[in-house]
Image: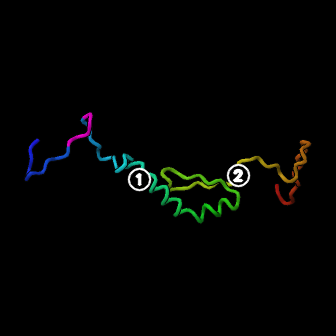
Amino acid sequence: MPERHGIRPPEPPAGGHRKGRGARRGGAPLSAWLRRRLAGFGDRLFSSQDALARQNGWQVTPGRHGLSRTYRDQRFGSPASPAGNRGDGDHAVPATSGCT
């Protein structure tokens, strides 16, 4: 290897492979670091909305990379019986006047 001004470039690691652009100190890939940072930012950004949703019994689902949320009221996922339904199959509809 050529030397410039008495400084020799570092030797590549054993096996001849160098860490690429996707690597950080300690061997953690940049993409994993970025995902953690984005998820943490999303958690801080949506913390008050998440707390309110959980207080009301809603399901909170973080979106892709933590930068979005889906809020779901569990009551809408279960079938509800109409107020007048007694379960006997008789579903009488009240007559309305003035309709033809």
Q: Position of residue 35 (x, y in %)?
A: 44, 51
Q: Identify which amino acid the numbered label 2 is placed on.
A: Gln
Of the residues under marks 1 and 2, which one precedes in the sequence?
A: 1
Q: Which residues are magenta?
A: 11-15
- Which SS class for mark 1? helix
Q: Residue at x 53, y 51 (%)?
A: 63
Q: Is residue 38 left or right of residue 85?
A: left
> Is 69 situated above or below 90?
below
Residue linked to disc 2: 74
Quarter containing the C terminus: bottom right
In the rendered image, which quarter is residue 83 located in?
A: bottom right
Label at residue 90: none
Disc 1/disc 2 C-alpha distance (Å): 32 Å
Q: Nearer the viewer, mark 1 or mark 2?
A: 1
Label at residue 34: 1
Q: Identify which amino acid the numbered label 1 is placed on.
A: Leu
Which class describes the residues within 10 Å of circle 1: few (<14), some (14-19), or many (20+)? few
Q: Residue at x 48, y 51 (%)?
A: 65
The residue lying toward the viewer, choosing from 52 and 81, is 52
Q: Position of residue 20 (x, y in %)?
A: 29, 44
